[in-house]
Amino acid sequence: MKPKLAQLLVCPGCKSGLDLFVFAEHGSDNIHDGYLHCRTCAKGFLIAGGIPRMLPERLYHNDAFRVKYRREIERVHLGRSASAAGSDKLLSHKANTLASFGWEWENYNRFGWERQSKDEFWSVENERERFFNNTLFEPGELSNKLMLDAGCGNGRYMIQCLQNGAEVVGVDLSSAIDVARENLGDHPNAHFVQGDLLSLPFRPQSFDLVFSIGVLMHTGAPQQAFGSITSMAKKGGGVGISVYQKQNPLHEFNDKWIRAFTTRFPRHFLKDTCNVMAKLARSAWKIRTLGLINALFRLEPYELCIYDWYSAPVATHHTLREVQSWFQHVGINELSDSTTADRRDAIRKWVWPMCGFTIRGNRAVDMKSSGSTGIHSFNQRGIS
């Protein structure tokens, strides 16, 4: 973790400022292990492996870290009492989502970074186009901007920001954040935080541009998660999100009962099944029948796309009007969306809509920020 990241961080619960305690460093600009302590509620968060773990202990366990730095952590909490942890109705869902997507990105760690197949159904070159289509940002507006990737996965969209001159913070609930750091950790303008989109650990209005591609519908509370990430954008800052689109009734029915099984499959079995389905999709694409199949259920020519669709514990589908109302609810009214590029007639759009859509707007309402971060370090005599 780079020390300047601490200036953005607050307690995800009470939103108060944090004190930073450094336990181990890799160079002068890289905190490898440390601790963040809330000044108000006295909760503590680990910095382990160079990543702030801004989750409750029920979602992030690291017993080895706590044993190794037991004395240092005790000294931080000496004379300070932590407030009682509140209940979280979504905790079980978050734990399942964390496990599911953590496994996914550990097994598809280089997806989007390396060419995947000879026939190039999915390649490195696709990722740039996919990023801009799914945020509706323009390449020229990214330079010198501070960006938030809300649900960064293995970091394949963070690199698009960096290559266009931005500084970017990636946040993810799962261990995918470790994969992103492994892919991008040496880049001076890349930062990584393990956190919850519903309780983001950043100061409001900190980012010039905020985006979330294919993530909000997996949170269990997509509108609440949207409000959370939107509050991170500065006044006038851009917000771009991509979500699953609601399909025709037959597709929705099929999707529901298929996912009732696939979300319970052992992960390796589902991965193998998705590999077979991807091969079928490629064959269907070659004879131009893949569109007809997608009117009935989701099939993609690459196994990760299918795995991602059918493995997530929760995956909500939305209409354009519904998501537009989310923007309007937080005061964003000047919107652009990706559906205008779909020139198919109304009947075909209803039978076979695109699997997802993107809306982009600029935030124009004020929110208060709070707290500050003090930086401390451990030396041989204690805290200095």
Image (spheres, rainbow, N blue to C red):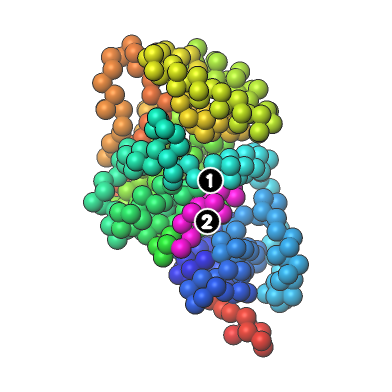
Using residue 200 as the reference point, say whether residue 70 is left or right of it: right
Using residue 176 as the reference point, say whether residue 146 is left or right of it: left
Q: Are marks 2 and 1 in contact (CB under 8 Å)?
A: yes
Disc 2: CA contacts within 10 A as few (<14), some (14-19) or many (>=20): few
- Nearest the camera: 65 or 181? 181
**Residue 326's x, y, as percent?**
41, 37
Using residue 226 as the reference point, say whether residue 334 is left or right of it: left
- Nearest the camera: 192 or 220? 192
Q: Is residue 282 above or below residue 331?
A: above
Q: Which mark is residue 274?
A: none
The quadrant where residue 129 appears: top left
Total labels drawn: 2
Q: Which residue is mark 1?
A: 109
**Residue 338's x, y, as percent?**
31, 32
Q: Which residues are magenta?
A: 171-186
Q: Residue at x 28, y 17 (%)?
A: 344
Disc 1: CA contacts within 10 A as few (<14), some (14-19) or many (>=20): many
**Residue 207's x, y, as percent?**
38, 57
The amino acid beneath tag 2 is: Glu
Asked whether residue 384 is in view, the answer is: yes
Asked whether residue 326 is in view, the answer is: no
Q: Quadrant of the C terminus?
A: bottom right
The amino acid beneath tag 1 is: Asn
Q: Which mark is residue 182?
A: 2
**Residue 334's x, y, as percent?**
27, 40
Secondary structure under tag 2 reads helix
Q: Is residue 277 magenta?
A: no
Q: Is residue 173 magenta?
A: yes
The Cα atoms of the two marked residues, 2 and 1, are separated by: 9 Å
Q: Is residue 119 above or below residue 13?
A: above
Q: Residue at x 47, y 66 (%)?
A: 5
Secondary structure under tag 1 reads loop
